[in-house]
Image: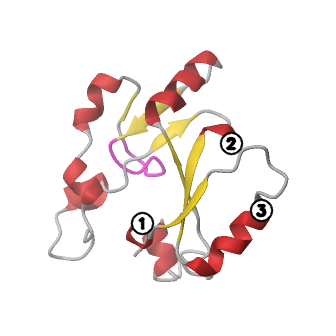
Amino acid sequence: MLYLIHVRSDELAYKGGQEPIIHLEADLHESIAWAEDHKRRWAFTLSNAGAYYFEDRSDLACLGEINWEAVKARKWAGSDVSRSIKEGKQAEFLVEKAFPWHLIERIGIFSRGYTQAVSTAMQGAAHRPTVEIKRDWYY
């Protein structure tokens, strides 16, 4: 999805580019523990959960089934890239209904220009995750 936003795809109504998008990072094990304590289902997918077909797992012992090379790949589209890379890059972690703000550990932003907007959005919040410029999380 971020790639489609980056190239301002005709498929999307949003045309604002990737720069205003923030990334929220949480610890996988803490997230699962919270979900289980609150009777929320969780799963990770091996590809895009929004696709017509995908496989999901809810067992940490299956994490090795994720195509980690695809997840790490910087180039994952184009005629010279295998379909398994494109699909594997879109693996997701999902929690049913909602995800608690207090589990967010870090916010990745595109550039320093977004620091103030993120800080303003968190104004008054008891929990204030670290905000870092993470250009390598963007295209």
| Residue wearing tag 3 | 121
| Residue wearing tag 1 | 137
Q: Is residue 3 magenta?
A: no
Q: Are marks 3 and 1 in contact (CB under 8 Å)?
A: no
Q: Secondary structure at mark 3?
A: helix
**Spatial distance from mark 3 to mark 1, Cα to Cα?**
21 Å
Q: Is residue 49 magenta?
A: yes
Viewer-nearest residue: 136 or 78: 136
Amino acid on which disc 1 is placed: Trp
Q: Residues within 10 Å of mark 1 (few under 14, many from 20)?
A: few
Q: Residues within 10 Å of mark 3 (few under 14, many from 20)?
A: few
Q: Residue at x 28, y 52 (%)?
A: 88
**Spatial distance from mark 1 to mark 2, Cα to Cα?**
20 Å
Q: Is residue 52 visible?
A: yes
Q: Residue 91: percent from the left, percent from the top?
A: 37, 48
Q: Is residue 33 left or right of residue 61?
A: right
Amino acid on which disc 2 is placed: Trp
Viewer-nearest residue: 73 or 14: 73
Asked where in the image residue 75 lies, by quadrant, the reply is: bottom left
Q: Is residue 2 left or right of residue 131?
A: left
Q: Is residue 100 visible?
A: no
Q: Secondary structure at mark 1?
A: helix
Above-or-below relation of 25 to 100? below
Amino acid on which disc 3 is placed: Ala
Q: Residue 76: percent from the left, percent from the top?
A: 26, 68
| Quadrant, the C terminus | bottom left
Q: What's drawn in magenta, residue-wise?
A: 46-54
**Spatial distance from mark 3 to mark 2, Cα to Cα?**
13 Å
| Residue wearing tag 2 | 101
